[in-house]
């Protein structure tokens, strides 16, 4: 069988699964052929090898908005590119959050997927960044803006987009639908055929697509091809868990959604072998793990449980829940890995902590974040109750104290969080405002009345440069410390995203795990004191091989006696390795 015949057959099988219960106006073979043509896949393409890792220990992804750093009279994307080159050379990949024209939600209500927001720059600016670093882009696949041309055509009842949106009736049983928001699900919209009630998972400005219409799938495949041409090699599928809807159903994590992801992976891998998909599914941990499929869906999944569990450990001084979770996490198969992060443009989700933290632990966590200036966003449960959904706070402020209140260990606690995250199995993602030690932006919060704005500060380049040039500023110290950590991490083969990981049992104040390189030549024992008390670490509990020479990679200090006891200061971390560098 030829490459093209095999691809055609595979796509037909996937499309048949997706549209099994839907009458579509195009034959499955014709649809598969059209998708291949749009992606410009030819018989000369390379057949993707299964279980191949398109990443290494050198990969660090910075998360940023296109205008997180601005300078008067200059396109923000140009300013961002120059800032990255000047201050963030340790970063080899960038996730630029939605850089398209939008109407709300800081970019996630897209008006036009094919254009770059003129207020940020142009496709040339995007491609310039992609020419130096791997570029990750959002594919906002569940919904678009109510101000998009597609939705305007829906309202007119004609033109491209007039049949792109999912509707239901107010008297339908929608009680089981899982929602991340408290707004009403259906938006009444006047059309030539009467009032239509459009499904809106997130807000009434974010109208949901109807993927039962294969033209919607075709449109997104065109968009993917355009992004590949612009240099995008990492696709973040935003809110993809809600993609397929069925009236009377929860309408989340449906089999058709998983099949759509498998189909997109098939197309993307055949078009560009090293391109990868990351699914953004802010849902309970066991559901999130299903998006790996059998190494045939997402290449990476967001490790959404890590932020609330790690912050919980650092503010309580106990790693009990964090350790339990880490022990239960399956190692990712080759061809897949975790995307680790502890802060992002969104808040710290609490749904991924469900079933992992006790309810009273979540209550304490929420109350502590409130004390540190955070805002709490809620969702409506199936019982109609309001439940905390997300904690909105800058990470630097979130870690300025413990459940006992603010203390003098904020900087050490903040750095400790990153030493843990950088060492874990998976690819690290670091929010630009974590790299810069940015604090809560209360002015932006007040101006917008949106809770997430508190952690979406916009830096003036001159002011930021002044802070970074001042060695005594928190911003300078944070960037210096994190840059040093990144530079150490990227030289260790035991920190390959798929290298072996085992959880250590060192009590509740010491959180530890062992990483071993895939060739078994390097071991790193990563131990952090998550408490505000000096804590003893007995080296002989780590099973260090006596014939090896061991060193703490972070301090450079050799371990002279593997029977000794080390004293770890509050929030101190050691990376004890038998190989200092690659």
Image (tube, rainbow, N blue to C red):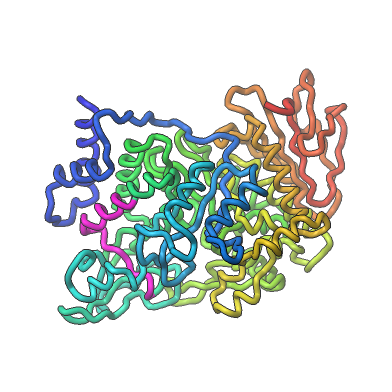
Quarter of the image for residue 393 reads: bottom right
The image quadrant where one finds the N terminus is top left
Look at 42% across and 40% down and name the residue there.
Answer: 275
Q: Nearer the viewer, residue 170 or 483?
A: 483
**Where is residue 155 shown, x and y percent of the image?**
23, 76
Look at 44% across and 72% down and name the residue there.
Answer: 104
**Where is residue 37 shown, x and y percent of the image?**
22, 42
Q: Is residue 273 left or right of residue 386?
A: left
Does the magenta run of residues contain 568? no
Look at 30% across and 49% down and name the residue there.
Answer: 260
* Residue at the front extreme of this rendering: 73
Look at 35% across and 31% down and name the residue there.
Answer: 48
* Residue at the top extreme of this rendering: 547
The image quadrant where one finds the C terminus is top right
Q: Is residue 38 left or right of residue 282?
A: left
Check the image and report above or below for 367 versus 355: below
Q: Is residue 127 left or right of residue 72?
A: left
- Is residue 469 visible in the rendered structure shown here? yes
- Numbered-mark total: 0
Does the magenta run of residues contain 207? yes
Q: Nearer the viewer, residue 26 or 22?
A: 26
Q: Nearer the viewer, residue 158 or 292?
A: 158
Check the image and report above or below for 30 versus 285: above
**Where is residue 113 shown, x and y percent of the image?**
36, 59
**Where is residue 529 shown, x and y percent of the image?**
77, 48
- Is residue 316 visible in the rendered structure shown here? no
Quarter of the image for residue 520 reads: top right
**Magenta-highlighted residues:** 204-223
């Amino acid at each position: 069988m030829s490459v093209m015949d095999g691809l055609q057959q595979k796509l037909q099988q996937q499309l048949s699964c997706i549209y099994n219960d839907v009458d579509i106006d195009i034959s499955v073979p014709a649809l598969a052929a059209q998708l291949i043509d749009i992606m410009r896949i030819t018989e000369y393409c390379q057949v993707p090898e299964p279980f191949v890792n398109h990443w290494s220990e050198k990969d660090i992804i910075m998360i940023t908005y296109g205008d997180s750093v601005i300078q008067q009279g200059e396109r923000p994307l140009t300013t961002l590119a120059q800032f990255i080159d000047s201050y963030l050379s340790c970063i080899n990949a960038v996730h630029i959050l939605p850089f398209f024209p939008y109407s709300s939600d800081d970019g996630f209500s897209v008006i036009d997927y094919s254009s770059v927001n003129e207020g940020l720059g142009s496709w040339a600016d995007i491609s310039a960044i992609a020419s130096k670093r791997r570029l990750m882009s959002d594919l906002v696949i569940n919904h678009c803006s109510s101000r998009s041309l597609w939705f305007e055509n829906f309202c007119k009842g004609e033109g491209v987009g007039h049949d792109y949106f999912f509707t239901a009736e107010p008297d339908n049983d929608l009680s089981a639908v899982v929602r991340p928001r408290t707004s009403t699900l259906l938006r009444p919209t006047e059309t030539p055929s009467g009032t239509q009630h459009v499904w809106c998972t997130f807000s009434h400005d974010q109208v949901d697509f109807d993927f039962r219409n294969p033209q919607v799938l075709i449109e997104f495949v065109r968009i993917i091809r355009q992004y590949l041409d612009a240099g995008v090699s990492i696709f973040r599928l935003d809110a993809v868990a809600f993609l397929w809807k069925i009236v009377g159903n929860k309408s989340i994590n449906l089999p058709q959604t998983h099949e759509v992801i498998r189909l997109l992976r098939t197309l993307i891998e055949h078009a560009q072998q090293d391109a990868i998909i990351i699914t953004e599914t802010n849902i309970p941990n066991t559901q999130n793990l299903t998006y790996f499929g059998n190494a045939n869906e997402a290449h990476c999944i967001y490790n959404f449980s890590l932020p609330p569990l790690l912050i919980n450990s650092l503010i309580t001084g106990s790693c009990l829940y964090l350790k339990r979770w880490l022990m239960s996490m399956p190692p990712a198969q080759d061809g897949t890995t975790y995307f680790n992060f502890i802060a992002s443009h969104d808040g710290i989700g609490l749904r991924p902590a469900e079933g992992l933290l006790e309810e009273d632990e979540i209550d304490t966590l929420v109350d502590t974040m409130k004390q540190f200036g955070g805002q709490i966003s809620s969702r409506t449960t199936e019982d109609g109750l309001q439940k905390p959904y997300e904690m909105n706070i800058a990470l630097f402020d979130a870690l300025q104290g413990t459940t006992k209140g603010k203390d003098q260990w904020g900087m050490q606690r903040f750095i400790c969080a990153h030493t843990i995250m950088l060492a874990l199995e998976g690819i690290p993602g670091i929010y630009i405002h974590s790299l810069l030690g940015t604090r809560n932006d209360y002015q932006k919060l007040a101006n917008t009345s949106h809770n997430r704005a508190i952690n979406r500060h916009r830096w003036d380049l001159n002011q930021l440069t002044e802070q970074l040039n001042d060695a005594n500023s928190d911003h300078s110290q944070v960037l210096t410390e994190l840059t040093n950590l990144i530079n150490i991490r990227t030289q260790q083969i035991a920190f390959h995203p798929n290298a072996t990981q085992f959880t250590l049992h060192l009590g509740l104040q010491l959180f530890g795990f062992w990483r071993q390189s895939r060739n078994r030549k390097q071991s790193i024992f990563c131990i952090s004191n998550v408490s505000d008390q000096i804590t003893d670490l007995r080296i002989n509990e780590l099973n260090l091989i006596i014939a090896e020479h061991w060193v703490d990679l972070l301090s450079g200090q050799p371990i002279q006696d593997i029977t000794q006891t080390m004293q770890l200061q509050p929030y101190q971390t050691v990376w004890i390795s038998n190989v200092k560098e690659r």
